[in-house]
Image (cartoon, helix red, strand yellow):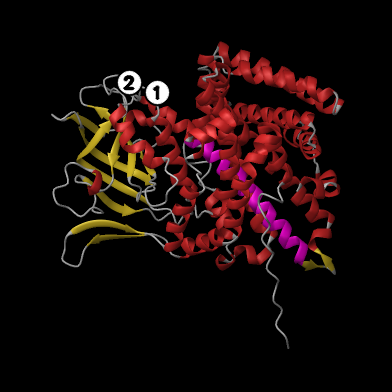
Amino acid sequence: MNRFVQPVPPPADPYADDTLLRSWLERHLGPAGHAAAKGRLADLAADVTGPLRAAHADAEAHPPTLVRYDPWGARVDRIETSAGWQAQRAAAARHAVVALPYLADARGTWGAAARVVQYALLHLYGPESATFSCPVAMADGAAALLSLPDVDASVRDAWLPRLVSTDPATAITSGQWMTESQGGSDLGRSSTIGRPAADGSWRLTGQKWFCSAADAAMAVALARPEGAGRGSRVLAPFLVPRYAADSPLADGAAADAPAPGVTVHRLKDKLGTRALPTAEIGLHDAYAVPLGDPGVPGLVRAMTLVVVTRVHNAAAAAGGMRRGLAYARAYADVRHVAGGALASSPLHRATLGTLAVDAAGAFALAGHAFALLGRVEVGADPEAAAELRVVAPLAKLATGRLAVSSASEYVESFGGAGYVEDTGVPRLLRDAQVLPIWEGTTNVLALDVLRALTREDAGAPLLSRLAAAVDLARALSPALADTLAITATQLGDTITAVTADPGADAVLAGARGLALRLAYALTAALLVEHAAWGDEQAELAARLWARRWLRHEDIAEDAHHHLDLLC
């Protein structure tokens, strides 16, 4: 008897076959700007569907290992990674996934919208990068921090060109050493101490508990300058070389040895992101250079990095949702159940269509954060800066939660095969679960949103965008416009009440719900904006998103009927 073998879904082209991505680029870049980006995007898409998909599988199959001692007993703390991980590293540099918004020719071509092109690159690259998208995010954040005018020029000149290099032989990435076991997101409890040295550098001593990209050439570490006092505001960011080659304290050590004073205690055994080396790292009089004046409270400087990594987190969520949807749809096209293709089942089509609505919303929300970031960096746009202050945490928290719920559905859509590791499908769920955790949990970010609303009037730009979207929606769908208008009024009233008594138990307990409502309303407005530009898919997604997330209606029947337009 012949054994049945299920056909493997063919990989789709993540650029050519993503109509929402292409129309989004057409709108934000203009036809000429999109044309200038097409070659770069098509090249990356070809790599993603070919060698990078294989590199991704290799890196997942061969996670990093820590070699503490050499054969003769010398402590080496060497993190060994797979050929697939190294291939992802080289591709990230070659395709300028970090570098693009810092390159003079990119800014000359696209201006502030260079960040929009970068978002498209991340959308293609991230989902099957074996989570190399994490060191990409931290390298970008470190580059943004190094670009600040109050960073010493000699430090910037020594490190920034390496972070934004497009040559794999010279490009580096960065780690982010902030959290400590006693504090976690409560940075005020950080106990790492920085002491000035005679040569103008500093020495850091402390224990960092969750250090992702532990194989990176440098890290940005938070430390409390000696004598600075308690709390989080006084913490200062420092650049710490990871290897002896970059540490002036190394005396004859091998270039790839750890920098003196840097000890890798162990690698983390994590639920997901298994190809990404994450470590506990000890610092004992480790060489460091300050990023800005450590005598001035430095947490606000460090937030430059955090904002960048938060929007990268949102991009990872949106990209993963879109790629998971593509695989689930491809599988449904070739899988037969009850005498017909799974893709013809109204129930399964409704499930996929609903997931497509969520993916479209996440894409728009993360993409908006990148567009704002570009306007802040290139044009110093104060309105964009005010909106980004609240959009960055909203985009991160909402997309992170959507990514987890969507990944669970994607795994389920493959049936038993989705639960078998060697299909690669379970990784979708394991890796998605980190997205609501990295760079602040949902509750941490919700409180950040609450602070922005009550201390910085961050609700004003959101309510203004909602009001404009109501006007745009009138020509598309009166029902959609009415929903947005009602939502805007309710949110305005809530923000007024919250601002009047921000410390009330009801306000604090309801911070998560408020943040999610704000994010869902903003997403509806962004989809309406794209629909008003002329995108039919965005118009349908806007109507269904508003019904699903603002009116809490069942959209199954419409999701079934319109699946082909939605994805």
Residue depicted at x 70% and y 71%:
7
Seen from the viewer's position, the closer of residues 514 and 212 is: 212
Distance between mark 2 and mark 1 Cα atoms: 7 Å
Residue at image position (32%, 23%) is 231
Main secondary structure type of the part rendered in magenta: helix
Mark 1 Cα-neighbour bin, 10 Å: few <14, some 14–19, many ≥20: some
Taking depth in this image into account, of 79 and 426 the one nearest to the observer is: 79
Q: Is residue 306 left or right of residue 555?
A: left
Q: Quadrant of residue 236?
A: top left
554 or 320, nearer to the observer = 320
Q: Judge the density around disc 2: few (<14), some (14-19), many (≥20) Cα neighbours within 10 Å.
A: some
423 drawn magenta: no
- Give the image location of residue 500, x and y in percent: 57, 11
Judge whether residue 124 can be spotted in this image: yes
Q: Quadrant of residue 461?
A: top right
Dots 2, 1 in contact, CB < 8 A: yes
Seen at 59% across and 38% down, the residue is 117
**Residue beneath the point at 39% across and 48% down:** 213
Residue corresponding to mark 1: 300
Residue 550 horizontal side relative to residue 381, left or right: right
| Stretch of the chain drawn in magenta | 309-335
Q: Of the residues shown, which amino acid type is indicated by label 2? A: Pro
The number of numbered badges drawn on the structure is: 2
Mark linked to residue 297: 2
The three-letter code of the residue at mark 1 reads Val
Q: Specify the farthest residue to the bottom.
A: 1
Q: Quadrant of the N terminus?
A: bottom right
Is 469 situated left or right of 193 in this image? right
